[in-house]
Image (cartoon, rainbow, N blue to C red):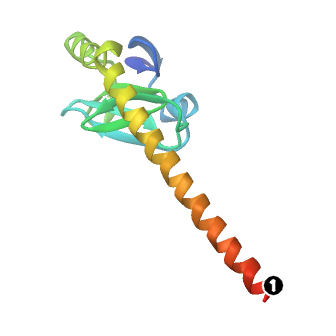
Amino acid sequence: MKIKVLLVMPGKEVQIIKIPASMKFIKSFIGEELYRIKLNENNVLIANYNANINEFNRIVKGNIILGTFIIVSIKNKFRVSMKKKDIRKFTNMFKLKKHQKKVEIFKEEYLEEYYSNQKIMKQKNAEKNRREILNIAA
């Protein structure tokens, strides 16, 4: 059985697609290690836990979501097609222009912190290597 879901890819607008409801297909489509974020009582965001760190996508509940993800409806613990009102709601919620600036700011802050930490680690390693060389020479 195929179901209607929302597909959200980094740097692209939200798309409505039909996919098989099986978890096996979702894993092959999104990734093997999945995590879920409950958006409301009927809808769940499914994303790849091991998404590429460079694929900043959208911000949900104050957290950045990396890589491609889907939004699917749940009824009685089964994945079902999304209702029109939910499609409208989440298409609007995840519009690219609403998230692009926030994601860019987050990306800049993240990369700044990352490179700062890399610089500190290099300095510590250089100091450690210098001490080891002095110990060997002594």
Q: In which quarter of the image is residue 126?
A: bottom right
**Residue at (55% x, 27% y) in the render:** 29
Q: Could you say where residue 38 lies in the image, as x and y percent from the top left?
A: 26, 37
Q: Name the residue under label 1.
A: 137
Q: In which quarter of the image is residue 104?
A: top left
Q: In which quarter of the image is residue 112?
A: top left
- Residue closer to the observer: 3 or 99: 99
Asked if 75 appears above or below 101 in the picture, the reply is below
**Residue at (44% x, 46% y) in the render:** 113
Q: How crowded is mark 1: few (under 14 residues within 10 Å), some or many (20 or more)?
A: few
- Quarter of the picture holding the C terminus: bottom right
- Quarter of the picture holding the N terminus: top left
Asked if 79 appears above or below 111 in the picture, the reply is above
Asked if 118 appears above or below 68 in the picture, the reply is below
Q: Could you say where residue 9 lies in the image, as x and y percent from the top left?
A: 46, 21
- Residue closer to the observer: 97 or 34: 97
Asked if 42 appears above or below 133 in the picture, the reply is above
Return the residue found at the far bottom: 138
Residue 65 visible from this viewpoint = no
Q: Could you say where residue 37 lies in the image, as x and y percent from the top left?
A: 31, 39
- Residue closer to the observer: 70 or 99: 99
Residue 113 visible from this viewpoint = yes
**Residue at (26% x, 18% y) in the render:** 90
Could you say whether the residue bearing mark 1 is in a helix, strand or loop?
Answer: helix
